[in-house]
Amino acid sequence: MPAPIYLDHAATTPVRPEVLEAMQPFFGARFGNPSSTHRWGREARAALDEARERVARCLGAHPDEVCFTSGGTEGDNLAVLGSWRARRDPARAGIITTPFEHKAILAAVHAATREGADERFVAVTPEGIVSLASFEAIVDTTVALCTVMWINNEIGTIQPIVELARRARARGAIFHTDAVQAFGKVTIDAASMPFDLLTISGHKFGATKGIGAMFIRRGTALEPLMHGGSQDRGRRPGTENVAAAVGLARAAELALAEHDAEHARLLALRDALERALMERVPDAVVHGRNGPRAPHIISISVPGTDSESMLMALDLKGVAASSGSACQSGTVTPSHVLTAIGVAPELASSAVRLSLGALTTEACVERVAQLFPELINKARRLSGSAS
Amino acid sequence: MGDRVLVAMSGGVDSSVAAAMLVDEGFDVVGATMKLFCHGDDIPDRPCCSLDSINDARRVCESLGVPHYVLNLERAFGEDVIDNFVAEYARGRTPIPCVRCNTFTKFRDLLRKAEAIDARWIATGHYARIVDGALHRAADDAKDQTYFLWGIDRRVLSRMLLPIGELTKAQTRARAHAMGLEVVAEKAESQEICFVPGGDYTAVLEQRLGTSAPALSAGPVVLSDGSIVGHHEGFARYTIGQRRGLPGGYRQPMFVVDIRPHDRAVVIGPREELLGHGVIARELNWLGAPPSVGATVRVRVRHRAAPALAEIVRLDDDEIEVALDEPVSAITPGQSVAIYDGDRVIGGGIIERAGRGPRQALPVVPASRGLSLSI
């Protein structure tokens, strides 16, 4: 079998060698606890402080506005529940979100409703973009928090975060964005953009799993999710994961330094792949194709096929793809994202997400451009003969 | 590498050993666990189809070095199996969901998944054997599962592998240990219906039909002479042959001998009223040539019953009648009749009612009709 092809970078990415190298000392001599007063502690503290400063620079933030977390899910939960609990104002019970958020947001918002919050969903267009008019209509002075993902993890559409944040702010609401897929793909600058909270996750751009960061704008009150020591200003008690934080800082810097070239490269590859697929499977539907889109995600549905069989068949041919966000047991259920943008269940159940990244080359694209239509034709022959 | 085979893996010992044996034999094994229903997170330790079972199947595949997939067949299973299960109880019958699961879910829907990945074969951990392209009873009579397999499409037989059909359960467990499948080797066997939490099927009926459905509402308990001797809380809570929960005070043990949805009656009677002399069945399926009228066969009307000698007395496109040499107890509408020629499964059907037996079996089927059917 030819070398396997990884087209699931939106799920996770390989750890970059530079990141691993940067982390190495902290698995050895520099093992100290940053809260300790002795030299080992000071060394670890220095590394952590530096990592925080570097991440802050990458986000256009002050170092004290950066909080290290375990990743996207923790960041999203801390943003939603932490800001809700810190304020908990019955006159401002509204939490606005979108129906196509990551489950970490949807579940956290829903959890807040058990503590008195009132969840409200903004309308989204068939193109996969939040409707500004709908947002405008529902953001009022009863809203505590708005949370909208920057880039959708299943279809790659880019949301108008600056416009949304500005409107939320104008009504006195806190604005959070889940930027897990966005970091390194779009320009993020806390200094010039009006969001209050932002979540990123290291393993989506070459750092290790289990590390993420939050931007928390000065003056934004958050109640910690966990209770314990005063690490990270009490926002995130627990001994810091120094090695991973250092790795995250390195990965973030690399992603920004390479952003322009990598963006252009991925865009060219994605367009080539998409063009080839559409040529060979003319009735295929690429979801969110007409909106502004990130360069690394193609969500494609082909009538008469099912994603479960396609993913198995692709995997057994050495191609890793996914149908959207992976779920606990590994099963495939119709995507809430596609449902939210009005894709019919039949079409949604055939969606396959191909996500490009560091491991994607022209050769990968050529092979998948050939293999995917072959498998589609086969699946259609089978479903035709079965019915 | 050998032919590709898709192995249906429940996370239990039987299908795990089946997969391991196929790996040993050089097949290109792909494991799949079907997710057939969802209880949510309410039941953390279900023996089947729960996340734990999926995890066990995955662990086995990891140790065998073969890929494992979870296939979501919830919607089709709900329509083909659970809906039918509920509908059958609602009309006073006692269904066997495992038969329809084999017929529709495992050996039709799963086969389509096998085709999508170019798998020549499909395998399961059933105790049954394929001999010369025909379905035969398992070597271990106590474990034989052919009673649940009569309904599958005969074209599937040439693509089925049943690796543990030659083993006893003890041998299967021993193999699991020998092959290092400690995760599953001593797993308890489930006798329950997989989608019925805690074994209480009436809870499923209540949820699906509503507690005021006729099948779950009060009705009379009567004797076969029509006299009312008590009341029950819904005929769907009873099955033919049941003894538990009936009015007492009789000289001999009493059993449910009939369920009559039209007047919601549960008919009870002594043991001899349970005896049936024949079987009439519908929803027929043949795994080879249909039997001829007049042929002597063996039939099973319940799992693990000794196959009983019988004669085919009538056979139409959609209904069969067999006469039993010796009467059989508790022939239950909704259950299956599996029909055998020796060890070989000829086919079967869903029991409509008990038949009249050899003496009254009429009418005589014209010879031409009989011939045309015995192709």
Image (tube, grey):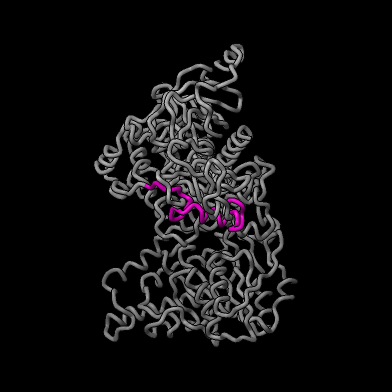
The N terminus of chain A lies in quadrant = top left
The residue lying at 52 percent from left, 77 percent from top is A81
* Towards the viewer: A337 or A284: A337
B353 w.r.t. B286: above or below: below
A374 w.r.t. B361: above or below: below
Q: How many marks?
A: 0
A141 w.r.t. B368: above or below: below
The quadrant holding residue B138 is top left
* Relative image position of residue A270 (x, y in whole percent): 60, 52
The C terminus of chain A lies in quadrant = top right
The residue lying at 55 percent from left, 43 percent from top is B259
* Towards the viewer: B213 or A107: B213
- The stretch in magenta equals B190-215
* Relative image position of residue B193 (x, y in whole percent): 45, 47
* Relative image position of residue B370 (x, y in whole percent): 58, 15
* Relative image position of residue B26 (x, y in whole percent): 35, 32
The quadrant holding residue A283 is top right
A87 w.r.t. A339: above or below: below
Tell me if residue B178 can be seen: yes
Q: Is residue B205 magenta?
A: yes
* Towards the viewer: B111 or B283: B283
